[in-house]
Every structure is written in structure tokens, then in C-alpha cells.
Amino acid sequence: MAEFGEQIAALPLHWDKKGNLTVLMVTSRDTGRWVMPKGWEMDGKKPWAAAEIEALEEAGAKGYIGNQVLGTYRYDKVLDDGSVLPCKVRVYPMIVDKLKRRWKERHQRKRKWFTPKAAAKRVDEPELAELLTALRDKPHKQPVIRNLLKSA
């Protein structure tokens, strides 16, 4: 077995009517803590395409996903047998243009829009909090997001 697991995540983004960036977070199924839609890579799918599927299944979010990594973070995933697997998560930004009313995991999770600062305060992982906090100031100036906005 690998020393650590590699996962992919979507960071669903949306600008509100005032032009402020918000991020969509979901609750985890086990502990109910706030997380990003994430999961394992999928055979035959590009990593960002797999992240886009996770966003749809876990949050009902549809839109444009970037193929460049915005950042990474690490966390310890508790497996079904109780063992702990350190995981590294690659985060792909996603511009949300639609939230579905009915989605696959709607009965297992809550979803909510937060400012990047409020989202950073709610996550357990320090590297993820840092990534979210970095979006607070001029997120559209970050190259990965700027490129995504051009293609969306």
C-alpha cells in the first residue's frame, strides 16, 4: 500500500452581486465538518474532470473547472477499518454557474456559500485554510483563477 493517498478536490467559486468572491463548502458525511468536494482519482478521467464530478455529486455544483492546480493540502483520512491514511489533495478551482436543487448526496451533506475568510475559519486543515485565506485579496489576480475566468 502507498505511503499516502492522493485525492482531488474542486473549489467551487462564485462572485456575488457585489463582486465579492464566495466559495461553496459541503459537510463531510462522517463528522459533519466543512470540507471541499473531494475524492479519489477516477480511472480514465483527467484529475480535474474527476474533481468536477465530485463537485456535482457532493454539492450539486455545475460550471467550469480549471485544469491547473490552485494548491494542495494534506489531511489524515480515517478509513473504514479505522486506520489512518495520510492524504495529499490537489485542488482545482471551479467557477459555478448553476447549483442543482436535486443532486446525488443531498440527503447526506449540507452545502453553503462562505467568504474565503469564513471558510478558512471552518476547515480543520491548516494548509487548506491558508489556500482559502489567499483568495481573500484579489483572487482574480491569481494566475490559475485568471486563466479559468478567461476560458469560462
Image (cartoon, rainbow, N blue to C red):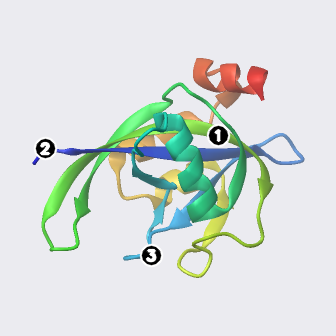
Residue 55 x/y as whole percent: 59, 54
Q: Could you tell which of marks 2 and 1 lies nearer the N-terminus?
A: 2
Residue visible at 56% across and 27% down in the picture: 67
Task: Report the residue marked by disc 1.
Answer: 94
* Disc 2 to disc 1, C-alpha distance: 29 Å
Dot 1 alpha-carbon crowd within 10 angstroms: few under 14, some 14 to 19, many 20 or more = many
**112 sits left or right of 127 in the view:** right
Residue 138 visible = no
Nearer the camera: disc 2 or disc 3? 2
Secondary structure under badge 1?
Answer: strand
Nearer the camera: disc 2 or disc 1? 2
Question: What's the amino acid at mark 3?
Answer: Gly
Task: Report the residue marked by disc 3.
Answer: 32
> As displayed, is residue 60 above or below residue 135?
below
Residue 6 x/y as whole percent: 29, 42
Secondary structure under badge 2?
Answer: loop
Question: What's the amino acid at mark 1?
Answer: Met
Dot 3 alpha-carbon crowd within 10 angstroms: few under 14, some 14 to 19, many 20 or more = few
Task: Report the residue marked by disc 2.
Answer: 2
Report the residue that reaches farthest toward the front: 44
Question: What's the amino acid at mark 2?
Answer: Ala
Residue visible at 84% across and 40% down in the picture: 19
Dot 2 alpha-carbon crowd within 10 angstroms: few under 14, some 14 to 19, many 20 or more = few
Residue 122 x/y as whole percent: 48, 61
Q: Could you tell which of marks 1 and 3 lies nearer the N-terminus?
A: 3
**70 sits left or right of 141 in the view:** left
